[in-house]
Image (cartoon, rainbow, N blue to C red):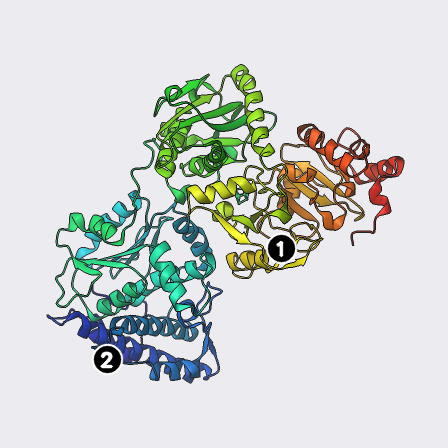
């Protein structure tokens, strides 16, 4: 595990220190090597800081590029976000030198090594002598950290190798990837590992420490760990972020220092060298073929079984991939073509485990770019299975299908669109593979609850139409379960982070009266989802102190959103669209938007293809509302929220709505009529225009005058 310095981070004067750090040790004990390594790292950091002071003065602030956390490890472990160069100099001089006999000796060595490496890197960056190649930016931490925390990625492997063992380590990295893990690699030859979404090249020299910066930022941003809460950080990393370090090749003092830091972060370490005096947590496995499995076992990582056996590559790294334009071979749903998905539980006898059935034509018999109807009907059985879990599993279909290379999925329930690329089709992908994905992933993620799964893929238009009413009835039954549950009657709301892989600054807050904006996650669904999958995307959010009952602002909700977005979204008002509205991803069922004269709102559903009186069509509205940015006056919602008494109550609620698509009126007509009755305005729905009345602002203004719309009697919104 020899590291060299081709990055130029360390200057020529440091050459002797560096050589002592990276040279193979000859029979030196682990503790001695680690202690020496920590001191040598501190020397290198001190030299880098001195050099930076001579160029920039001692007041210049140290921070790493690509992160909001300044010096993330220092922030996580000590609660100090950044240091001026002069402070860094003092900090390094006063680092505690542990007594070899003290019980915390190794932890202190690990922490000193980590912080010295981080300061050295930041000082090199400020001097421009280190490009920080291999540092993982916050944007990637958000994507992959979330997958690790919610269990989609079961753990991370950090692989170190010297030049003689790089090929072996490459093979180990591939094995880790195939088991669904994140692989962070650090070695000293070649231009870098081949790029792959779940494989990070950490750079050379002390680059391995960057893997720990990644872990610390996951704890701070997603684990709710407070900066400087050492106990909380330790506990979180131990329980939630499972890291296995695998080292091959010669053993150096830098390795020993890094291993000590890795142990501090709850990692297990497996090397192919028998290191004298190796502490608990560091073990030797000389059989290179067994090192990965040994590391996985030592750290207790629940590495996954194989992904679905389909002809295209599969994994979370393909989730953000778009399939569009001339690359589309087939589209199911959208633009008038029905496409729905439904997962229900069934009697054991009715479910033949693993059965995937196609009713209708397959992809090869359709024309290039054809748009077709499709239904994905999934039936599951398990003794522990119950109806509350159906929608939780059904909502996961969105991600599972997006994991397939060349296949894209959006929407939910009966607003689904699925695209298959020409490349996927050429590789042999057929429509039954959609079913194979779902069957395999239900078992993989919910195997403790579900023991049998079967899936029917339907493309026959008559059959899709015949099955659709049953799906609508099932969705309706689910929605009715939350009726009667009110926001004031619960102490906790829930957050859902499922869409953060695509929209990192978006977090849905789900209350009894406001479902997730995709419409398929109610408060009860999130509650059940949390129970069945504690590390999944749903988290309880204690409401905390009520700051504003009309706008729906609570301290606990603000804290949850602020923490999840690293401060990018500081507060959210649950019942307002004009003041700190909830952010949106791209999954919204409908968008609410303010009219140009700021007197009223319009609402368009995602299947609406025409123009709206706001002057844009649905994609235009979604662009205003989406991307995880708060845009007052624009907000994505789940359609059932419209009939809630909390619906934008800060701005007047349903009586503020002057225009709504006719499809929405039809879909939630009974609920809307009931709400109008509650408001004492039984004719309100008739006074809300739709596209059959007008599609432009002038027409809407005239309509509002004609029907004496209630919004005309309210205060202007701006
Ligand atoms: S839209 Fe919201 S509730 Fe729905 S899956 Fe995405 S984050 Fe979860």
Coordinates of residue 423 in the picture (x, y in percent): 40, 32
Q: Residues within 10 Å of mark 2 (few under 14, many from 20)?
A: few
Residue found at the very far left of the displayed protein = 27
Q: Which residue is mark 2?
A: 99
Q: Nearer the viewer, residue 73 or 443?
A: 443
- Please tell me which residue lies in front, 12 or 417: 417
Which residue is situated farthest in the front direction here? 489
Image vertical order of residue 207 relative to residue 578, above or below: below
Q: Secondary structure at mark 1?
A: loop
The structure residue drawn at horizontal position 48% and vertical position 31%, both measured from the top left corner, is 387
Query: Ligand 1 closer than 8 Å to the CB at disc 2?
Result: no
Q: Quadrant of the N terminus?
A: bottom left
Which residue carries the number 1 mark?
Answer: 572
Residue 72 drawn above or below residue 679 = below
Quadrant where the image shows the C terminus: bottom right
Which residue is located at x 19 percent, y 51 percent? 291
Residue 141: mark in rendering: none
Whole-number angstrom distance, CA of label 2 to CA of label 1: 49 Å
Left or right: where does residue 373 sit relative to residue 643? Answer: left
Relative height, residue 123 to residue 640 (above, below): below
Would residue 205 be seen by someone viewing this image from the given angle?
Answer: yes
Viewer can see residue 332? no
């Amino acid at each position: 595990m020899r590291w060299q310095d081709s990055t130029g981070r360390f200057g020529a004067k440091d050459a002797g220190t560096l050589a002592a750090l990276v040279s193979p040790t000859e029979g030196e004990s682990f503790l001695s090597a680690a202690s020496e390594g920590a001191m040598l790292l501190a020397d290198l950091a001190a030299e880098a800081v001195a050099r930076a002071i001579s160029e920039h003065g001692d007041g210049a602030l140290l921070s790493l590029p690509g992160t909001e956390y300044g010096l993330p490890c220092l922030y996580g472990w000590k609660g100090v976000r950044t240091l001026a160069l002069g402070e860094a100099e003092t900090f390094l001089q006063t680092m505690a030198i542990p007594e070899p006999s003290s019980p915390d000796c190794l932890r202190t060595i690990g922490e000193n090594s980590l912080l010295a490496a981080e300061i050295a890197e930041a000082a090199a960056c400020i001097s421009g002598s280190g490009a920080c190649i291999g540092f993982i930016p916050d944007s990637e931490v958000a994507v992959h950290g979330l997958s690790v925390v919610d269990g989609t990625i079961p753990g991370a492997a950090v692989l170190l190798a010297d030049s003689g063992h790089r090929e072996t380590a490459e093979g180990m990295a591939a094995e880790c990837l195939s088991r669904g893990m994140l692989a962070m690699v650090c070695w000293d030859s070649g231009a870098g590992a081949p790029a792959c979404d779940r494989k990070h090249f950490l750079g050379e020299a002390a680059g391995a420490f960057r893997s720990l910066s990644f872990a610390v930022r996951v704890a701070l941003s997603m684990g709710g760990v407070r900066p400087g809460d050492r106990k909380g950080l330790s506990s979180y990393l131990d329980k939630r972020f499972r890291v296995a370090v695998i080292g091959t090749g010669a053993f150096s003092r830098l390795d020993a220092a890094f291993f000590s830091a890795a142990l501090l972060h709850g990692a297990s370490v497996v090397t192919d060298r028998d290191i004298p005096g190796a502490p608990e947590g560091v073990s030797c496995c000389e059989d290179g073929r067994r090192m990965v499995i040994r590391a996985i076992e030592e750290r207790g990582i629940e590495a996954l079984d194989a992904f679905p056996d389909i002809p295209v590559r599969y994994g979370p790294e393909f989730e953000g991939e778009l399939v569009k334009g001339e690359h589309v071979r087939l589209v199911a749903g959208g633009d008038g073509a029905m496409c729905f998905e439904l997962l229900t539980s069934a009697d054991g006898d009715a479910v033949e485990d693993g059965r995937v059935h196609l009713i209708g034509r397959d992809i090869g018999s359709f024309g290039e770019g054809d748009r077709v109807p499709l239904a994905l009907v999934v039936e599951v059985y398990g003794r522990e299975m119950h109806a509350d879990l159906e929608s939780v599993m059904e909502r996961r279909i969105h991600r599972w299908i997006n994991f397939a290379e060349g296949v894209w999925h959006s929407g939910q329930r009966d607003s689904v669109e699925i695209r298959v690329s020409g490349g996927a089709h050429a590789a042999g992908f057929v429509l039954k593979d959609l079913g194979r994905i779902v069957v395999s992933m239900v078992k993989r993620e919910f195997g403790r609850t579900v023991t049998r799964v079967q899936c029917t893929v339907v493309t026959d238009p008559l059959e899709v139409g015949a099955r659709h009413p049953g799906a609508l009835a099932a969705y309706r039954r689910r929605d009715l379960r939350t009726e009667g549950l009110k926001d004031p009657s619960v102490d906790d709301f829930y957050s859902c982070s499922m869409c953060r892989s695509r929209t990192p600054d978006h977090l849905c807050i789900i209350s009894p009266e406001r479902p997730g904006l995709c419409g398929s996650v109610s408060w009860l669904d999130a509650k059940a989802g949390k129970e069945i999958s504690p590390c999944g995307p749903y988290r309880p959010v204690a409401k905390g102190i009520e700051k504003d009952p009309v706008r729906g602002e609570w301290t606990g909700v603000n804290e949850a959103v602020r923490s999840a977005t690293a401060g990018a979204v500081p507060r959210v008002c649950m019942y307002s669209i004009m003041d700190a509205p909830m952010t949106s991803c791209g999954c919204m069922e409908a968008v609410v938007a303010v009219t140009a004269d700021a007197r009223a709102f319009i609402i368009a559903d995602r299947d609406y293809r025409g123009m709206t009186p706001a002057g844009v069509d649905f994609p235009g509205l979604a662009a205003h509302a989406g991307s995880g940015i708060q845009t007052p006056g624009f907000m994505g919602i789940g359609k059932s929220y419209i009939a809630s008494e909390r619906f934008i109550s800060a701005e007047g609620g349903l009586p503020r709505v002057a225009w709504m698509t006719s499809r929405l009126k039809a879909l939630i007509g009974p609920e809307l009529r009931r709400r109008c009755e509650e408001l004492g305005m039984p004719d309100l729905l008739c006074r809300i225009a739709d596209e059959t009345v007008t599609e432009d602002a002038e027409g809407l203004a005239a309509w509002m005058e004609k029907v004496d719309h209630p919004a005309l009697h309210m205060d202007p919104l701006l």
